[in-house]
Image (cartoon, helix red, strand yellow):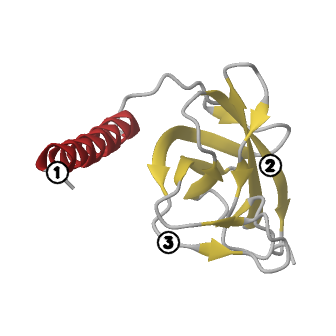
């Protein structure tokens, strides 16, 4: 192979590696970007005595790998993009309670998107125990590859005296 062809191949490889590095850096910069995502306002959720103090959504990446063995579409791989909803609730009820929180995430077209995956026997929602007059934080990952989430809603199950099966 003559030197010009070898040089051209090396330049093409270096250019491809440079583009891949640039795309990776740009993607990571987007992950750190401030979002304009609307979530539920603070207040009582539905007709319960559970008060949403605050919540927010951020774009992140899964830190580990998880596979729910019964339902194989409930899985994620370390490093995959996701949205994470974090928040704090308060139980204004008279008794300690188990609360299930299930988010629904909507894209710019108003379509429900993403898959909630928690490490539990029911991976499509997060279960939180909150003492009477107590507060508790929650964190719910949503498997979703795009960065076009415009809003999210939170639906509660419970409160109940016992955790879900």
Check the image and report above or below for 161 versus 143: below
Q: Which mark is residue 156?
A: 2
Camera-near label (3 vs 1) is 1
Among the two numbered marks 2 and 3 on one chain, the one whose residue lies closer to the N terminus: 3
C-alpha separation, residue under disc 3 versus residue under disc 1: 47 Å
Q: Which mark is residue 64?
A: 3
Among the two numbered marks 3 and 1 on one chain, the one whose residue lies closer to the N terminus: 1
C-alpha separation, residue under disc 2 versus residue under disc 3: 27 Å
Q: Visible in this render: residue 152?
A: yes
| Residue displayed at 62% across by 56% down | 133
Q: Which mark is residue 2?
A: 1
Image quarter of residue 165: bottom right
Q: Which mark is residue 112?
A: none
* Number of residues whose C-alpha sits closer than 10 Å to that of mark 1, classed few (under 14), some (14–19) or many (20 or more): few
Image quarter of residue 150: top right
Q: Nearer the viewer, residue 87 or 15?
A: 15
């Amino acid at each position: 192979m003559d030197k010009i062809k070898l040089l051209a191949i090396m330049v093409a490889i270096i250019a491809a590696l440079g583009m891949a590095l640039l795309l990776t850096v740009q993607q990571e910069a987007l992950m750190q970007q401030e979002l304009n995502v609307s979530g539920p306002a603070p207040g009582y959720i539905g007709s319960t005595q559970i008060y949403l103090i605050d919540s927010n959504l951020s774009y992140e990446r899964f830190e580990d790998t998880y596979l729910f063995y019964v339902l194989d579409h409930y899985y994620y791989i370390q490093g995959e993009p996701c949205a994470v909803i974090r928040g704090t609730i308060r139980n204004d009820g008279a008794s300690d309670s188990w609360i299930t929180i299930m988010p629904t995430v909507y894209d710019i077209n108003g379509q429900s998107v993403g898959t909630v995956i928690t490490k539990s026997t029911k991976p499509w929602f997060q279960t939180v125990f909150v003492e009477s007059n107590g507060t508790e934080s929650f964190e719910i990952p949503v498997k979703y590859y795009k960065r076009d989430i415009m809003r999210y809603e939170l639906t509660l199950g419970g409160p109940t005296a016992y955790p879900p099966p």
